[in-house]
Amino acid sequence: ARRVAILISGSGSNMVALVESMTGDHPARPCLVLADDPHAGGIAKARALGVPVAVVDRRDHAGDRAGFEAALLDTLEAAQPDIICLAGFMRILSPGFIRQWEGRMLNIHPSLLPKFRGLDTHARALAAGEAEHGCTVHLVTEDLDAGPVLGQARVPVLAEDTDATLAARVLAQEHRLYPAVLERFARGRCTGPG
Ligand code: GAR
């Protein structure tokens, strides 16, 4: 099976959706959940699911992105992933780091890219008066939130929406979209035996 490492910074609900999807005849299995914050809520969830967990604490490398990325790389390489899924991983990775995983690293972003790259996507979608919003899974390239789109899911924006209600509607779609895209992606790359 293809080996999938999942990088998280927070609650890890997308990570849980991905891990729970990788069963049966799914072409991939989780090999590692890597958090950049020892307090990330997703750590306990990953442990409960029986997935190996590692923490590379960004605060141990404050002001030293090269050192942080070297530690990330060591930890990742030990797990030998074929595919990396960023799932609410809130650090910007350097072009050099990204290049090593080019074509093998996926991200989920809470907007209909190319709209609303970056942060605060739900508030910005509301402020822009969008009738529709959603989420995107894309390949990670050096350009932030601008790599090739692998899949999108749409939700309506309702008149009474707040950031929180809109975010929850989008997140429910993230939990469907990301596993679906990962399965298709892993199958496409699964050319050899095993
Ligand atoms: C998700 O909405 C994800 O799309 C977003 O963070 C949330 C993580 O939730 N990612 C980004 O904003 C990336 N810039 P989760 O930890 O429960 O999966």
Image: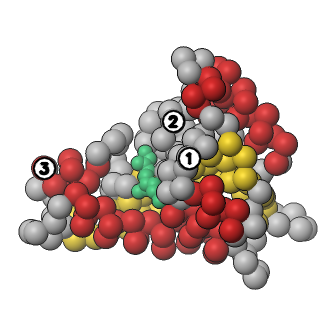
Q: Position of residue 95 (x, y in %)?
A: 58, 27
Task: Tell me which amino acid carries mark 3.
Answer: Ala
Which residue position is annotated with label 3?
Answer: 127
Residue 119 drawn above or below residue 99: below
Task: Tell me which amino acid carries mark 1.
Answer: His
Number of the front mark, 2 or 1:
1
Q: Position of residue 99 (x, y in %)?
A: 65, 32
Can residue 188 be seen by looking at this rendering? Answer: no
Can residue 148 be seen by looking at this rendering? Answer: yes
Which residue position is annotated with label 1?
Answer: 39
CA gap, disc 2 and disc 3: 25 Å
Which residue position is annotated with label 2?
Answer: 91
The residue at 87%/63% (across/down) is 192
Q: Does mark 3's beta carbon lie closer than 8 Å to ligand 1? A: no
Marks 1 and 3 in Cβ contact (< 8 Å):
no
CA gap, disc 2 and disc 1: 15 Å
Residue 60 drawn above or below residue 78: above
Q: Does mark 2's beta carbon lie closer than 8 Å to ligand 1? A: no
The residue at 40%/71% (across/down) is 173
Image quadrant in which the N terminus is located: bottom right
Report the side of 34 relative to 50 (left or right).
left
Looking at marks 2 and 3 on the same chain, the residue that comes earlier in the sequence is marked by: 2
Task: Tell me which amino acid carries mark 2.
Answer: Arg
Q: Secondary structure at mark 2?
A: loop
Number of the front mark, 1 or 3:
1
Mark 2 burial class by Cα count in 10 Å: few <14, some 14-19, many 20+: few
Please tell me in which quadrant of the rendered image residue 49 appears: bottom right
Image quadrant in which the C terminus is located: bottom right
Q: Secondary structure at mark 3?
A: helix
Give the number of marks: 3
Please tell me in which quadrant of the rendered image residue 155 appears: bottom left
CA gap, disc 1 and disc 3: 32 Å
